[in-house]
Amino acid sequence: MTKQSPPDLTLALRAAGFRGEIETDRALCSAMSTDNSVYQVMPDLVVAPMDAADMVTLERVMAEPRFAAMPVTARGGGTGTNGQSLSRGVIVDTRRHMHRLLDFDAAEGWADVEPGMVLDDLNERLRPHGVFFAPETSTSTRCTIGGMVSTDASGKGSRVYGKTSDNILGLEIARPEGLLSSLAPAPNWARPTLDAAEAAARSGRAAFIAATPRLNRRFTGYDLERACPEAGGFEWWRLFLGAEGTLGLVSRIRVALRPLAREKRLLVAGFASFREALASAMPLAEFEPTAIEVMDERVQKLADGAGILTRLPPALRASRGQPLAYVFIEFNGDDATDLRTRLSACETSIHALPGARAIHMARDAAEIRELWAVRSAGVGLLGKVDGRARPVAFVEDCVVPPENLPAFLDDFLAVLDAQGLDFGIYGHVDVGCLHVRPALNIDTDRERLVAVSDAVFELTRKHGGIFWGEHGKGVRGAYLRDWIGAEAYAALQGVKAAFDPAGRCNPGKLVGLDAPVPAIDEIPFRPFNAPEGDALTRAFRCNGNAQCLSYAAATPMCPSFKATADLRQSPKGRADALRAWRQARLKGRVDAALEADLTATLDACLGCKACASSCPVQVDIPAMRAAFYADLYTRKARPLADRLMLLAERESVTLQALAPFMSPVWPLLARIGGALTGTVDLPKALAPALPRADRIGAADLARPLPEGTVIVIEDWFSALFDGAARTDALAGLKALGYRPRMLAMRPAGKTAQSLGDPRFKTMANRFARHLEAAAATGAPLIGLDPAVVMQLRQDYPQAGIALPPVLLPQEFLSREIAAGRRFPDLAATGPAPKLFSHCTETTGAPEAAADWRRVFAALGVEIDTPATGCCGMAGLFGHKTRHQTVSRRLFDMSWAPKIGDEAPVLATGFSCRCQTERLASVPARHPLGLIADLAAA
């Protein structure tokens, strides 16, 4: 901890009128201590300013002598691969509140944004106006414009669009005296700072230019060349581009806008080897594509194993285990004739290249996005490899002249071979940038990390390149002085001293004043591996790729983060806190403060399991929460609400038998239950018993069943409360010619499993035997509620429990259609029904919505399947009083805008139907209910 007291700073900020959050929460600090790098630095305090005025207040208070030495570091999306935003002292979270589009003029080609705005969010808002902000990063769903400015990020299409610094028109920064904007005359108070910075910049400009290779991916960060134009003047704001927050806080950014091309095409070519794919880059560049990117055989194999390559056309999928390397070539333009000519010539050229196996052209914008997603997703999967050594980012964005790339790669791979290291490769070959990620065990391989880093640094100099070509410098700024030379580095120090004389802005990065910046092995590393077999292994394997921080409301992962923009309420943040807690437990200690803060953030997890399938390394927070609870509640008493829910699940068979007697007094019982469990809006009635002919019990399973029998599985909540869906499911299946029977309910242990109750295993084994007896009849098993089906597929295997297949209704019916079964043609009038999938179903069974469309198409019925995130109910989460704000916000963000017309609403999940009725006053049916109605009409 720094010498200054965070509580004192908190009091001072509040007294000065700071309006945003000021927190020392241990779970939040743990979340802020890592990024997508191998490092971990624990901050003392996290602040989230509301706007630029709050930033000025922060700067003014921290300029007081008692706080003047406390570090201050801005943070955006936290996607840096080199520890850029990791620091002790104060972390300034710009993502949480400062994410607004302040102003824009599409005709003039500019937009003003706050630094916490996410790239995809900005471009989605600009798209209707026919413009966008470049470049296109692979982390565009969660990286912020401020972070892009700070690291001078680059990405796909940079050969045409340049880096971030090529697309910025001006900045505003927060100072203790006020705001300083490059788009307005400098106030008098800023003149001494700007004069000192200009003098320093001019003194080293010539040396800076002499040390900087002339490349597309030019060197930036303290850019003395552009800050001091040949024509005169001083563009001080250009010094901040790529400076990684070491000069101060950026509060407003003016970005340049480019017109969207009217035509876009994507060619994807498969090559027999990466060498042959790499060799294609230079010949293909002659056709002036916007981007040429490659993905090697290892990344392809990982993507194939994760099922991601199913998005590719069949011709581009590897057969019989034969690996492929891919080349992605994008063409953009407004002249359709010219585009066709270039595409045709490019295709002809590819067919003639050695090793070319297959080629596919994508014309549709949605397909192009899907295919680029293959490349982006493959990158995250590098962290999923088995073993204690995994590909890590530390020498991955070197840039050399494209013509030098093959020789540079040969030397690079020789370094890795000498160290005995495996690796994965992808990158932007059109600009000479390959991302090579060596596989290391950071717990034990730190000397090798340094050796490889030193060797690759020298290779970039040998081949006329730059060590930091896309992802910024961060901790690797330790090489900056040697690379740029003493004279130019002294000028950088002068610039730093002008804007940050105390050296408090992101200290230890890029430029040191009184001492050298730390070496790459002098910054603390994050723990890389848990003990073998540890229940929290996935928390240690979280690499900070941060796909869980996607801003889009229609993306299921992660609902609690989307509702709060609070990093601790994300899989990445929870994994960081779980890892810190586990480290203490492994040492036999209980960190009480961390444990309390961790308990609070885990309580806010909806348990939707999107992270278990959507996260590249499958950081399954609900499963790890269960392990945490299992430890915690051996030492503490469980909350009464949890004990009552566990009891209700265990005794659910008895409760179902008693339902006819409880029904008359259920409203009273619901009020009492709500008071005891802290819940609201519980189901208004108990489900009536099904007719005997629709049920099937253990004794019935021993007898032959009629042809066409299907057995429907229900969970205890549906059995007690969801009478409408039970009736709809049976009626819909009957209308399609089946003989459905509802299996006698047995609890599957979902509540016990999620709360870490040790009785889950007994309950699950009993349920497995129940399903095995049902499967032995030969009848298909169909799960009524998708949340329970996903539990059987995800949590039961983790517990070592094998089950017979249990299908979702649409999976079963789709298979029947594929096998040749014909369904009746059902006439439908009025607007197309909207079918909403349960979020756990969307991520755990990605074809769920498409399967429903196939089923209804076979019935002659058109349906709409809007893309949505979580509805905000998630079992009991949305019923809990303490979660009402988040629950309602999630519904308003994702579901409410899609519901709002006269179209009938269908929802596959019981939770979703409850939430829709409760918050939108719209009754939602199970899809099989609509089928039953149409058949009866």
Image (cartoon, helix red, strand yellow):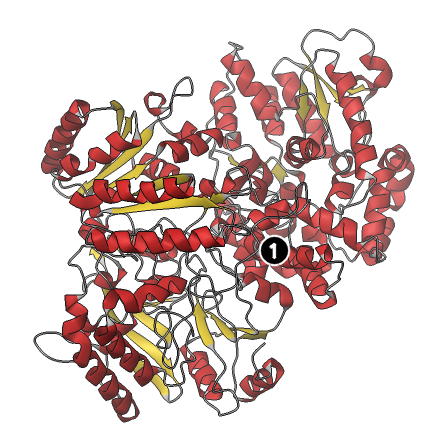
Please tell me whether residue 256 is drawn above or below residue 625 in the rendered image: below
Extreme-left residue of the structure: 231
- Residue 704: percent from the left, percent from the top? 78, 6
Residue at 63 percent across and 45 percent down: it is 537
Instruction: Point out the image quarter for the C terminus.
Output: top right
Does residue 604 sit above or below 711 in this rendering? below
* Residue ID at (80%, 38%): 760
Against 677, residue 811 (above or below) is above
Label 1 environment density (alpha carbons within 10 Å; few <14, some 14–19, many ≥20): many
Residue at x-position 27% and y-position 51%: 459
Which of the image's four quarters has the N terminus? bottom right
Q: Nearer the viewer, residue 14 or 827?
A: 14
In the picture provided, is 878 more to the left or to the right than 50? right
Q: Can residue 244 be seen in this snapshot?
A: yes
Question: SS of the residue at dot 1?
Answer: helix
Residue at the location (57% across, 23% down)? Answer: 811
Name the residue nearer the viewer: 476 or 289: 476
Q: Where is residue 673 drawn, in percent x and y? A: 84, 52
Residue type of the residue flagged with mark 1: Arg
Q: Quadrant of residue 144?
A: bottom left
Residue ranking furthest to the front: 418
Residue 110 seen: no
Q: How many marks?
A: 1
| Residue 541 vertical placement versus 935 (above, below) | below
Position of residue 480 measured from the top left corner of the image (x, y, whole percent): 30, 66
Q: Position of residue 731 (x, y in %)?
A: 67, 22
From the viewer's perspective, tell me whether residue 561 is left or right of residue 723. left
Question: Is 36 on the left or on the right of 272, as rendered?
Answer: right
Q: Nearer the viewer, residue 430 or 719?
A: 430
User: Residue at label 1?
Assistant: 574
Could you tell whether 358 is left or right of 43 in the image?
A: left
